[in-house]
Image (cartoon, coloured by chain):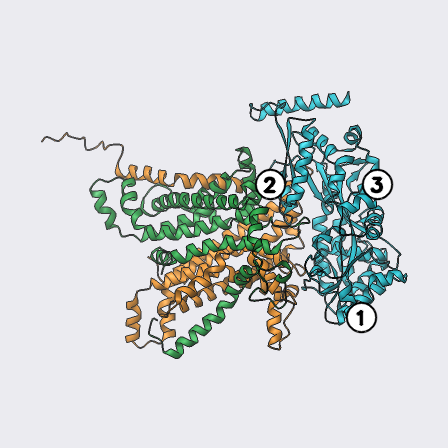
Amino acid sequence: MSQPTQAPHKPPFWTIARRDAAAGYIFIAPQLIGIITFVLVPLGLVFWYSLHEWNVLAASFNFVGAANYQMLLADPNLPQVLIASAIFSAGLVILNMSLALLLAVLLDQKLKGMVVFRTLFFSPVVVSLVAWTIVWSFLLQNNGGINGMLAMLGIEGPNWLRTPTTAMISVVVVQVFKNVGLNMILFLAALQGVPKELYEAARVDGASGFKQFRRITLPMISPTILLTSIITIVGSLQVFAQIAVLTQGGPGMTTTVLVYYLYQQAFQFHFFGYGSTLSILLFVIVAVLTFVQWQLRKRIVFYEN
Amino acid sequence: MKTDLSPRMKTALYGLMCILLIPFVFPTWWMITSSVKPISDIFAFPPDLWPRRFDFSTYAQVFELQPFARQYWNSAYIAALVTVGTMVISSMAGYAFARIKFPFSNAIFMVVLLGLLIPSEVTIVPLFQIFLGWGMINTHWPLILVPIFGAPSVFATFVMRQFFIALPNELEEAARVDGLGRFKIFWTIALPLAKPALGAVAIFTFLHSWNLYLEPIVFLSSTQMFTLPQALTQFTDAYGGAMWNIQLAAATMTAIPVLLVFIVAQKQFVEGLAHTGLKG
Amino acid sequence: MTKHLLKTTAATAGIILGLAAAGTAWAQDAVNLRMTIWSANEAHLAMFNEIAEGFKATHPNVSVTFEPLPFDSYTTTLTTQIAGGNPPDLAWILETTAADFVNSGALAPLTDAFAATEGYDLADVSEKATALWTKDGQLYAYPFSTSPFAIFANNDVLKAAGAKTPAELIAAGEWTWDNAFASAATVGQSGKTGLVVRDFKFQTWQNLASIWNGWGAAPWSADGKTCTFTEPAMVDALTAIHKAIFTDKAMPGPGEDIDFFAGETGMTITQISRASLLPKENPFDWDLVPLPAGPAGEYSVVGQAGVGAFAKGANKDVAVEFLGYMTNAENSKKLAQFFPPARASLLNAETLASTNPLLSPEQIENVVISGIANGTVLPGHTNFAQIQQTIRAGLDSLWVPEADVAAVLANVCSSVSPLLAR
């Protein structure tokens, strides 16, 4: 034997498993260090702030323990803020997902000019948020474009941004039109990934179009639905510029969602300590929602590889 | 689903889509046409679909009132750097989480996913303090480093991981038998296959960076350093009142190039997404 | 002597800080002051840079950077910078947040430093104008802009509707809110818009002070501790405003954003500085008149902006010195080009005519000079942002046709009282 003999009970240090582990850590290192520096450390600092009374202008920073959390529980505004957030997020997710799915199904048809439609439906995504919201704030005024059109049809439109119900509908709808294009593209991609043979087989079995959609399409794209719903819910809890421009949280406090309330407390009222406490609350809500959705995936997702 | 449709059905579909288009297209249309209207015509009621009078001087004024070309460059190069950086970081991390077995990989992945859950308003003050400590206030570093390494890149990592998980094992096995290292495999085999997913990541990342608003306002202070969304708010008269036509001209110039890029690249974009783990 | 000592202290402090911070920069070389402002207007910036250049004559090592921040998020951005430990050296301050900044101790006291500045003459600045910016006899920010509220009238629109113009009413000695609302109602019922309170938008309720001060009404007591929305004067004033909006159509309702300067509105209440928005093409026959008399007699209201230096800044003393230079008698004349001054010596038709070329001598005399001299500043309060927001939310239920004014105002007081009492 010309090969050098190796002691069988003493393998080299760099086994494949160890090499893999080292490679794995090197591959994820930049991301992990980034998350620690730019997410975990700031989050820890926010928690630290939440234990303090911090008046920025007076430069006072005093440890108050759980006082901010007690204030949270006693905050008379918090129930309506949470209700507004729940209505906003639920409305946004339901409307966004169903409209995105409808548009994706329409765009998936074999018709000429779909590329044009696809581009136009997507176009608000690239328009600056500020410009988009300002245009809508003109259209939604009592004497604005929408009520002008309704008047031509003989309908007296509501005072959109000044009536509690319609104000909430308006902020939801404006946000949906702005961003539904992203989900639409995700759904469209998912639809185009469904194997055609499945439909062939179903047609042979005589399944109607709607039945095909319910039995084949929906299950096949359910992972996309799950993922987009998570992204959309998380996104909906972070919306505030639109509300600042359109309603400033009003009328009353009907459109003051949690992130807007947080922004007000910290950046407008200068209560950074309490604002940080609200941040922690927001983080916990987002984390719990995501966890629940992730746990539910086994039930709602029919197919996953 | 894709049966050939009857002509009546086709007409109905076109009609439906045209009606659905109105709320998507009208605001943008109004933005573009109003950017060449004299300011007194902008708020005409009912809104004009076509300008009554044209005033193209707004476009020149955009460049006179702000160092707009410089701000354009700032936004463009930051977005480009962030896009490339994110593609590198997230494809490496996504690959490792998907295909390499190493201790605690799942736990670490969960930690990384935390980044998806935190609104930027929550961490902006501590981030400001961190960058102040590094002497990076009023530089572009926070706008480059945070998106590449921090929370915004997590979604990209997630997309890449989903893509790499779906890759068949055999492709790599052969290479491993040949004794190729992980880096080689990643670089020569996995990454070239990941082009569609990378394309999707690139577009999402670019859009995110291009539209970033809160962070530039907080981190940047001199007009020379501003990015576009921030510059848009600077077209005001002496009393903070918005100069609408100029602002809309600037907004139009901000949107059009991105829209053009989307039109050119959308085929790859949609196909890219169709091939990622985001599909059905 | 004092001045020299100050400088030495500043230099020493600067050296220590400089060494501690980086170990490279020595204090005696370049000091760069940063001032945040909310105007990105080129002409403004040019003027400020000119003043900063002038300061270099005596302080060759000092340069000043003017940092325009977006108006809408101005205070927010400023606060974030302070919270992050990076406050500017100097900053413009809105009248509404004046109390917060002045009372917090964030700003450096100015009175003594200004007194020590040659030819400053702080007594020239009207006491009414400095009241908001003063605590315990010390000035903490200089009110560089004191802009009176007045009424711009579009006589073309008023006459076309058959309404009396303000000029006619003034000539007849009948310029009261009753008659002003009546004129506005005539215009409103003719299909155009009668009277717009600019920037109010059913959000910025403090701008209604330009009306309710005529009733002698105020949102809270002089000491700021008690809500006075339920006082008869305020109930009467808001009842009159509510009637003008919903019964007489004299003012546009909520959600109807109308710009007077587009030419389709009878009258607007705004600050005189907005004269620059009058259309140059297709001009209409406009007039500028003082606010009408209310049941409580004649009155005037001003909006203010101040500029202060931060007490914790590394270059605090240089910053205060620069502020003294920027707002001295000579430079105040430059500032008056854009910002109505509160200095008695500048409040004459001659100075103001050159800076307000659109206004006639009577308009300057009746509106600008008497407005600045007699004006009450818009309401302000410590923690104004939260109080503003709470009252805004409460008043929202007033802006419907069938509102019960007294009941709504009682609600406003019950929700805002705990905040005022703090």
Question: Disc 2 or disc 1, which is closer to the eye?
Answer: 1
The x and y percentages for residue A32 are: 42, 40
Q: Can residue A136 be seen in the rendering of this structure?
A: yes
Would you name the residue on which mark 1 appears? Answer: C162
Q: Can residue A66 be seen in the rendering of this structure?
A: no
Q: Chain of mark 2?
A: A
- Residue C63 sits in quarter: top right
Q: Is B12 drawn above or below residue C395 in the view shown?
A: below
- Residue count near mark 2 (Cα–Cα under 10 Å), binned few <14, some 14–19, many ≥20: many
Would you name the residue on which mark 3 appears? Answer: C344
User: Which one of the lettered chains is coloured cyan?
Assistant: C
Q: Earlier in the sequence, mark 1 or mark 3?
A: 1
Q: The disc labelled 1 sits on which kind of residue?
A: Gly
Q: Nearer the viewer, residue A107 or C267?
A: C267
User: Which one of the lettered chains is coloured green?
Assistant: B
Would you name the residue on which mark 2 appears? Answer: A49
Residue at image point 56% right, 35% down: B132
Question: Disc 1 or disc 3, which is closer to the eye?
Answer: 1
Q: The disc labelled 3 sits on which kind of residue?
A: Ala
The x and y percentages for residue C335 are: 73, 41
Q: CA distance from mark 2 to mark 3?
A: 47 Å
- Residue count near mark 3 (Cα–Cα under 10 Å), binned few <14, some 14–19, many ≥20: some
Relative side of C262 to A203, left or right: right
